[in-house]
Image (cartoon, rainbow, N blue to C red):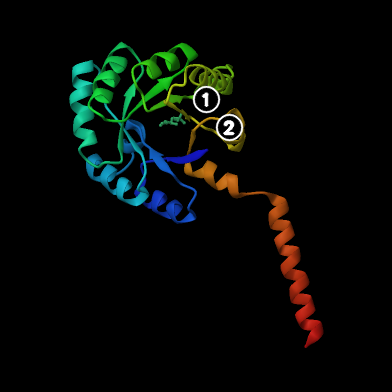
Amino acid sequence: MKIFVDSANVDTIETLVPLRIVDGVTTNPSLLAKEPGDPHETLARICRAVGGPVSAEVVATDAEGMVAEGRRLASIDEHVVVKVPFGKAGVQACAALAGDGIRVNVTLVFSPAQALLAAKVGAAFVSPFVGRLDDVATDGMDLVSRSVEIYENYHFETEVLVASVRGPAHVVEAARMGADVCTCPPKVIDMLFNHPLTDIGLAKFLADWEKAQVVSV
Ligand code: E4P
């Protein structure tokens, strides 16, 4: 399973890339709005840093506007994936952009029916928002499992990109279900590395080694 960073912070992304576990980045208007400077320049820097798919979302709300904005975003860098919100306008824009050979991530997907429609119009990625579903007492991961099943049934090439991830359990479940990608906030990536028994085990190994050096002197 590919791991994307869900962030628009260039410094954070540049810190994570050398770990060699990062395959791409997702941004959204809320994340980009937190960063200083020109958003297009920020996206260009992220693309250079990660060298993999970087989702950049349109803010137009009509299909024509989404297509025009999507083309502008795609011209920033070959790694840009244009993100469009699910809906009638988003679906039409996805079909047009995909027809131009531009990769599209259909975002704000909350039902298997929406995931099916996004795949039918050639989305490269579809983003089920699992955490926001969990927040309203609905099983977000069930949407992932149903989307994976539907895409397998019809051999859609659309990749299931698990979004709105809140912790390692979402990541592990996504991998068990065969999701293609999981996009994680930086703090969740940190959590994936951590286990108290690893820390305790390493401290003991080093202490035992240190003791043996003292005895042999
Ligand atoms: C993904 O592409 C979205 O930007 C993101 O995962 C949304 O997550 P949130 O629900 O934590 O805002």
In terms of image quadrants, where is residue 174? top right
Local secondary structure at mark 1: helix
Q: Horizontal and vertical percent for residue 29? A: 32, 31
- Give the quarter the ligand 1 occupies: top left
Query: Above or below — where is 22 with respect to 111?
Result: below
Tell me which residue sits at (74%, 75%) in the image: 210
Residue nearer the viewer, 24 or 129: 24
138 lies left or right of 113: right
Q: Horizontal and vertical percent for residue 92? A: 27, 15
The reply to whether callout 2 and callout 1 are in contact (CB within 8 Å) is yes
Local secondary structure at mark 2: helix
Q: Horizontal and vertical percent for residue 3? A: 48, 41
The numbered mark at residue 130 is 1
Q: Horizontal and vertical percent for residue 193? A: 59, 49
Tell me which residue sits at (23%, 45%) in the image: 41
Q: Earlier in the sequence, mark 2 or mark 1?
A: 1
The numbered mark at residue 170 is 2
Tell me which residue sits at (37%, 44%) in the image: 52
Residue nearer the viewer, 41 or 92: 92
Tell me which residue sits at (36%, 36%) in the image: 27
Q: Quick one: which residue is furthest to the right in this view? A: 215
Crowd tier of the residue under label 2, counting other residues whose Cα lies within 10 Å: few below 14, some 14–19, many 20 or above: many
Q: Amino acid at mark 2?
A: His
Instruction: Look at the image and tell me in which quarter the C terminus lies.
Output: bottom right
Residue nearer the viewer, 35 or 82: 82
Q: Quick one: which residue is furthest to the bottom in this view? A: 217
Q: Amino acid at mark 1?
A: Val
The numbered mark at residue 159 is none
